[in-house]
Amino acid sequence: MSYFEIMHCINKHYFGNSMSTTSFRLDDDLQEKLDSTATRLQRSRGWIINNALRQYIEREEQKQRMLEETEEAIADIKAGRIVSGEEVMQWLETWGTSTDTKAPLV
């Protein structure tokens, strides 16, 4: 097996898929922090960058999902698809009693 085949297997095992190469510029201070972090963690700069980008993108995707859910909730409110606070309180008062009821529906 060649070096490149071995490296491909290692990358496939640790990263789960093939990897592409991207080039970008870093501020000098960020480059220094990246290098010191890589040394401290005994990881490559590429591993740290991949991990950081993955986390960042996951957070941004979560923010987008939350925004979409909020917009859907606002549309429901505007369309009158709501349960009043009074209905919710009446339902909560039945919890743990013999007259325990189901949650109010829209």
Image (spheres, rainbow, N blue to C red):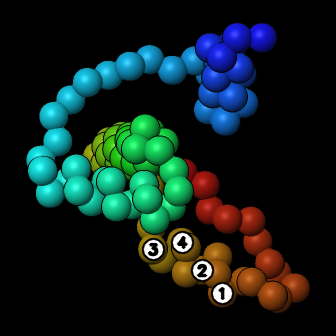
Tell whether label 2 touches label 4 (CB within 8 Å): yes
Q: What amino acid is labelled 3 in the image?
A: Gly
Residue 58 vs residue 35: left or right?
A: right
Tell whether label 3 touches label 4 (CB within 8 Å): yes
Give the residue number, with chain letter if any, for mark 1.
Answer: 93
Numbered label attached to residue 22: none
User: Could one spot residue 81 in this view of the protein?
Assistant: no
Residue located 12% across and 47% down the image: 27
Tell whether label 1 touches label 2 (CB within 8 Å): yes
Q: What amino acid is labelled 4 in the image?
A: Glu
Q: What amino acid is labelled 2 in the image?
A: Gln
Give the residue number, with chain letter if any, for mark 3.
Answer: 85
User: Could one spot residue 15 in this view of the protein?
Assistant: yes
Residue 50 vs residue 22: left or right?
A: right
Image position of 103 with respect to 71: above or below: below
How far apart marks 4 and 3 lie (CA) works out to: 5 Å
Residue located 58% across and 18% down the image: 18
Q: Where is residue 82 in the image (x, y as percent from the top left)?
A: 44, 55
Residue 7 vs residue 58: left or right?
A: right
Tell whether label 1 touches label 3 (CB within 8 Å): no
Give the residue number, with chain letter if any, for mark 4.
Answer: 87
- Quadrant where the N terminus is found in the figure: top right
Q: Where is residue 47 in the image (x, y as percent from the top left)?
A: 48, 42
Give the residue number, with chain letter if any, for mark 2.
Answer: 90
In the structure shown, which secondary structural element does the residue marked by tag 4 occupy? Answer: helix
